[in-house]
Amino acid sequence: MFYEPGKTDHGLPNDPFKACVIPRPIGWISTLSPSGTANLAPYSQFNNLTFDPPYVMFSANQTPSAAQKDTTRNVEATGVFCWQLATYELKDYVNATSEQLEYGVDEFEHAGLEKEDATLSFVNVRRQSGSGSGNDAGQARGAVRTAVPMVKRSPIKFECTHYTTLRLPGNPPMGAVDVVIGRVIGIHIDESVLTNGRIDVSKTVPIARCGYFEYAAVREVFEMRIPGMGAGTGLEGSVKGHREMLEERQGVVEGKDGDEAVGGAETRGK
């Protein structure tokens, strides 16, 4: 069969597009609003982009009311977000946090998830005074540096700074999408999921999005090495190996802290 999306009918009971691109990692993204309310939501269009320095992306379509997703609003307002690995053990919580709630509702509390503070990712939260009477009622009383919350039970978590948002046009109400790109500045790994120094998928059992209402649980993997390359060449995007390669070729490592590799520092929310 062949069809042109949006132009000709595919003739199937359900649209097959997303079912063609599988499995897709889940971007389980946590943020804070400028007023300090936590937000947590899964996105089925998520991936890493590069490794030195590491960047990730997730894309968020508009809501049925043609509004920007809460996650994107918070990231653009504060400049920071966290990603947590969605696992089979946590699948029901992932699903619970996918519910579209009113802006300002804490999905951690809604789903019954325990929080853990980020180490590097903070938001200067605007605090309001009490609701008493007088001219000072409801007035801002300064900002409080507050850590972005993460899912404590997730075995792997990234802390990210917002690099840019690419907005792709689409048909209303939900077709337009925000592609949010962030630089990973901190990585948390529970040592219990390591085997011989490697992350063991039989211990993490990550879940991935498939088509329709389907998910996959990753429990088995196999290896294939690139022909003509040594075993360590490019292994999992090794930053150390990459910079040693540069040292060998140029005699000096440029931008050892990674800042020179970034087209502009991410400063919001710091």
Image (cartoon, grey):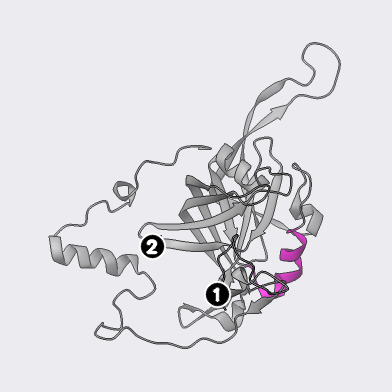
Q: Main secondary structure of the magenta part?
A: helix
Amino acid type indicated by mark 2: Phe
Question: Which residue matches tag 1?
Answer: 2
Amino acid type indicated by mark 1: Phe
Label drawn at residue 88: none
Question: Which residue is at the far right?
Answer: 133
Label drawn at residue 51: 2
Question: Which residue is at the far front?
Answer: 8
Q: Position of residue 146 (x, y in %)?
A: 62, 41
Q: Is residue 200 left or right of residue 250?
A: right
Q: Is residue 87 above or below residue 52?
A: below
The residue closer to the viewer here, 124 or 43, is 43
Can see residue 22?
no
Q: Is residue 145 left or right of residue 268?
A: right
Per the image, label 2 sits on a secondary structure element best described as strand
Q: Quadrant of residue 114?
A: bottom right
Can see residue 97?
yes
Q: Position of residue 260 (x, y in %)?
A: 29, 47
Is 257 part of what is drawn in magenta? no
Q: Position of residue 169 (x, y in %)?
A: 55, 47
Question: Which residue is at the far top?
Answer: 135
The residue closer to the viewer here, 84 or 164, is 164
The residue closer to the viewer here, 174 or 42, is 174
Q: Residue at x 28, y 70 (%)?
A: 241
Distance between the alpha carbons at the discs numbered 2 and 1: 37 Å
User: Where are the magenta residues, as a range?
Assistant: 86-98
> Which one is earlier in the sequence, the residue at label 2 or at label 1?
1
